Image: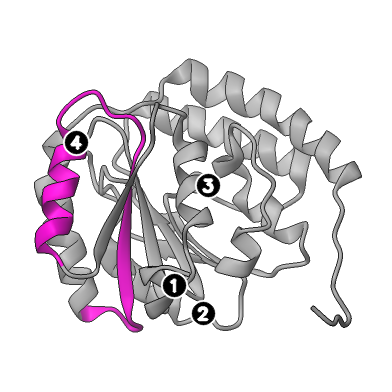
Amino acid sequence: MNKSGEYALTVVVPVYNEEGNLERVEKEMASFLQTARVKSCILFVDDGSTDGSEQRIREICSRQPGMFYLSLARNGGLSAALKAGIDQVFSKYVGYIDADLQTSPQDFNLLLEYAPDYQLVTGIRTGRKDSLVKNLSSRIANGFRRMMTHDGARDTGCPLKIMWTEYAKRIPFFTGMHRFLPALIQLQHGRMMQLPVRHFPRVAGKSKYHLWNRLAGPFKDCFAYRWMKKRYINYEIKSGDL
């Protein structure tokens, strides 16, 4: 148990070379903590940044109550950063949002309304402010993933999610995991709710994704998921004497 156990929701914020965004992130997260429907905290996970992100995060956490951080020894990618954060969370719920703030932390309050009844509550980005190429590649990848996983998720790439922590901790870890959170929660017989959320243009920093890793990576990962699904072990403890 750590400090996150004192809260109902921990929002994990993976960070990789987002120094230019962090002043805005601090303001937005501080505002959310004041208005959150449940007692909440923020957990930054620096994914081996090579700019000044780690130092900025340390400064933010030193002056903001309810904000904490982890620093990974090397860059492992979004799935690794997200899994590292989940592993350290002991609140009832764990949330996820990207540091680019193309979604608003205030919309967690919309998701929290349904969190007691659904193991995963996820956003659907409305009025997306991305480029034509990014929107098209995302639509293709989403369609192929739905066909392969049958998870029913309309926008699995939306970086605004709340999960029950006990379910999130049982998610199998693999590169690309973040694209399959609905399917991985459903493997545990968890229920999903999808809600429309706002979407904003990126105002600082650079996207870590391009056409190749938006299509080639998800394509290969879908086959990995299908292989894993056939072999996934799901159990429930009836009783014990530990």
- Image disc number at residue 83: 3
Corner quadrant of residue 6 = bottom left
Q: Marks 4 and 1: which is nearer the front?
A: 4
- Image disc number at residue 114: 2
Residue 176 image offset from top left, x and y in percent: 58, 34
- Foreground of the two, 175 or 110: 175
Q: Residue at x 60, y 40 (%)?
A: 177
> Gap in Å between the C-alphas at discs 4 and 1?
28 Å
Label 4 is placed on what type of residue? Ser
> Gap in Å between the C-alphas at discs 4 and 2?
33 Å
State the SS at label 3: helix
Q: Which residues are magenta?
A: 35-64
Label 1 is placed on what type of residue? Leu
Discs 1, 2 touching: Cβ within 8 Å = yes
Residue 90 image offset from top left, x and y in percent: 49, 69
List the residue tagged with mark 4.
53
Label 2 is placed on what type of residue? Tyr
Type of colouring: one colour
List the residue tagged with mark 1.
111
Q: Earlier in the sequence, mark 4 or mark 1?
A: 4
- Foreground of the two, 5 or 218: 5
Q: Residue at x 82, y 39 (%)?
A: 228
Q: Marks 3 and 2: which is nearer the front?
A: 3
Asked if residue 193 shows in the view, the reply is: no
* 230 left or right, relative to 138: right
State the SS at label 2: loop
Mark 4 surroundings: few (<14), some (14-19) or many (≥20) residues within 10 A: many
Discs 3, 2 touching: Cβ within 8 Å = no
> Gap in Å between the C-alphas at discs 1 and 2?
6 Å
Residue at the front extreme? 242
